[in-house]
Image (cartoon, grey):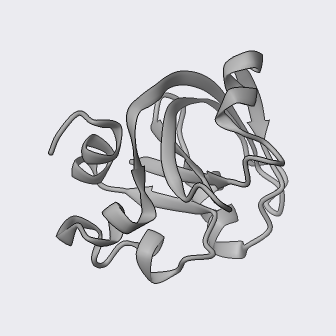
């Protein structure tokens, strides 16, 4: 499974991840988003999405490890992937049929969103 992780860039941005190379993804409180974090497995692909003024998918990362021993606060370590050459905006995402049923569009406040392989490919520039 692939996932999209939303972050407010003034709190933690993709540039921060580029500088740090790895981080623990935390601060998630929504029960559905926490469930998605607990379900992650090492090696799964991630898209980092900036909320706020940007509203766009800006980079990639990979799950390194998941410690779900505390069910309310799973610790997901992620590592830097690459920046997305042409970030995809929320408007572009909403215009794609592939995202019509996606929680990214249907549940706008959800901070961890599962992605299909096709959605991941389009967001990262790997597929059209």
For residue 48, side relative to residue 21 (left or right): left
Count all numbered tags in the image, as a single digit: 0
Q: Which percent across, then down, holds residue 115?
A: 37, 56
Q: In front here: 13 or 46?
A: 13
Given the current orientation, which residue lies at the most extreme left position?
128
Residue 99, percent from left and from top = 29, 69
x and y percentages locating residue 64 in the rendered image: 61, 26
Residue at point 62% right, 23% down? Answer: 79
Residue most extreme to the bottom? 106
Q: Quadrant of the image for the C terminus? A: top left
Q: Please tell me in which quadrant of the rendered image residue 16 appears.
A: top right
Q: Horizontal placement of 33 versus 46: left or right?
A: right
Which of the two residues, 23 or 43, is positioned nearer the viewer here?
23
119 with respect to 105 (left or right): left
| Snapshot quadrant of residue 20 | top right
Q: Residue at x 33, y 71 (%)?
A: 94
Vertical relation: 111 (above or below) 11: below
**Closer to us: 20 or 1:** 20
Tell me what residue is drawn at x 65 percent, y 34 percent. Answer: 14
Spot occupied by residue 106 in the image (x, y as percentages of width and height):
44, 82
């Amino acid at each position: 499974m692939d996932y999209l992780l939303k972050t407010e860039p003034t709190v933690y941005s993709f540039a921060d991840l580029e500088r740090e190379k790895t981080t623990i993804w935390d601060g998630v409180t929504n029960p559905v988003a926490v469930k998605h974090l607990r379900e992650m497995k090492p090696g799964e692909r991630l898209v980092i999405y900036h909320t706020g003024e940007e509203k766009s998918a800006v980079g990639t990362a990979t799950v390194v490890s998941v410690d779900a021993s505390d069910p309310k606060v799973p610790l997901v370590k992620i590592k830097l992937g690459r920046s997305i050459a042409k970030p995809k905006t929320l408007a572009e995402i909403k215009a794609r049929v592939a995202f019509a049923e996606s929680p990214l569009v249907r549940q706008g406040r959800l901070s961890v969103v599962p992605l299909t392989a096709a959605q991941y490919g389009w967001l990262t520039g790997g597929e059209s």
